[in-house]
């Protein structure tokens, strides 16, 4: 199968590496010639170009758009003249409701996708073949999605070692608001709150003492600002609902501590630990 990856950043580059490793023929498109050169040197792609028109030379059977979210629809529209009628197209955006319907109207063989994987290091430099191994990879079919296109994407998800999860765009966006987009805002808020410490000595000491707990809870908040903006802009309502739910829980904790209700606080934390253990990603963790 011939696969084209448009956008060779962390996700696109990692897809290219793994699909090439799995024996697929992979072509890359990047606006940056240096990115193309690095992708070729790393063996992620067998060919690479800087213009979408170059895809006609490759005639891909699948195209995965790995651009920033705001560019997905424009990229797809620009791609259409260079696609064969049988080409399956997907994306990797973290918000699906604003994308999947319009994209399917543009190209009937479109299937929305979202690999639940990432790293702090962005760009082709951070790409790794095993980025998706064992991770959920959401495909978001709608009633208009063509079954054969969905089957092709399920094959590719399996090829990169990820676990296929099917969800409609609305349910996807509501779920990721809780477990992906809210943590980014919470982490950002934590960093901003600590940075407001007015005593420079205390702030310096806090930075020195910060260990794994602070690192784990703040990591995504210190990530790429553009990604956080995309989450907030394109998943606004679901993220606002999640933020309000989180604020309500913080208020409960504040009231328990303010009222010195230590037994109630302990019970709350015990229930929270039980809930924490229900997430597959935490099972087996100490």
Image (cartoon, rainbow, N blue to C red):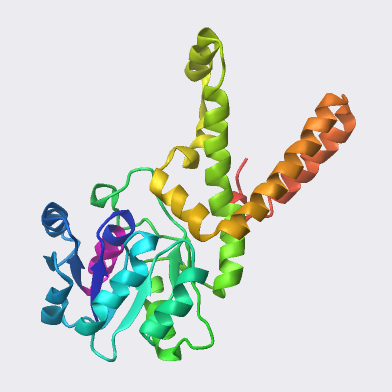
**Picture residue at 51% right of the left edge, 8% below the top:** 201
Looking at the picture, how far across and down is residue 49, in whole percent? Answer: 12, 66
Q: Quadrant of the C terminus?
A: top right
Magenta highlight: main SS: helix
- Residues drawn in magenta: 14-25
192 w.r.t. 134: above or below: above
Inspect this view and state whether residue 199 appears.
Answer: yes
Residue at figure coordinates x 45%, y 90% from the top left: 147
Q: Residue at x 46, y 61 (%)?
A: 94
Position of residue 254 measured from the top left corner of the image (x, y, whole percent): 78, 31
Question: In the rendered image of this protein, does residue 237 appear above or below residue 263?
Answer: below
Would residue 209 appear left or right of 32 to someone viewing this image?
Answer: right
Q: Provide residue 232's location: percent of width, then percent of height.
A: 52, 53
Q: Residue furthest top?
A: 201
Q: For this rendering, which residue is in front, 38 or 202?
A: 202
Q: In the shown orientation, is residue 269 left or right of residue 32?
A: right
Q: Is residue 15 magenta?
A: yes
Q: Quadrant of residue 253?
A: top right
Image quarter in which the N terminus is found: bottom left
Q: Percent position (x, y) of residue 81?
A: 21, 84
Using the image as rendered, state which of residue 95 and residue 36 is in the foreground.
Answer: 95
């Amino acid at each position: 199968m011939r696969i084209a990856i448009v956008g060779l950043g962390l996700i696109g580059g990692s897809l290219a590496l793994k699909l090439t490793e799995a024996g697929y023929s992979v072509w890359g498109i990047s606006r940056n010639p240096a990115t193309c050169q690095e992708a070729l040197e790393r063996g992620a792609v067998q060919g690479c170009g800087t213009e979408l028109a170059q895809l006609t030379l490759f005639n891909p059977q699948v195209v995965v758009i790995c651009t920033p979210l705001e560019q997905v629809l424009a990229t797809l529209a620009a791609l259409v003249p260079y696609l064969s009628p049988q080409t399956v197209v997907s994306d990797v955006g973290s918000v699906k409701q604003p994308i999947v319907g319009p994209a399917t109207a543009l190209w009937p063989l479109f299937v929305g996708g979202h690999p639940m994987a990432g790293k702090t290091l962005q760009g082709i430099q951070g790409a790794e073949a095993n980025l998706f191994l064992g991770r959920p990879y959401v495909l978001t079919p709608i009633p208009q999605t063509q079954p054969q296109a969905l089957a092709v994407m399920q094959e590719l998800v399996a090829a990169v070692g990820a676990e296929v999860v099917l969800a409609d765009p609305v349910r996807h966006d509501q779920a990721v608001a809780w477990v992906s987009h809210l943590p980014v805002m919470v982490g950002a808020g934590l960093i901003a709150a600590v940075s407001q410490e007015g005593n420079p000595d205390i702030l310096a000491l806090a930075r020195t003492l910060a260990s794994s707990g602070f690192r784990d809870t703040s990591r995504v908040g210190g990530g790429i600002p553009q990604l956080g903006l995309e989450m907030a802009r394109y998943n606004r309502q679901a993220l606002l609902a999640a933020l309000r739910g989180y604020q309500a829980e913080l208020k409960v904790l504040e009231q328990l501590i303010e009222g010195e209700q230590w037994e109630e606080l302990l019970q709350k934390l015990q229930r929270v630990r039980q809930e924490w253990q229900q997430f597959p990603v935490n099972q087996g963790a100490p």
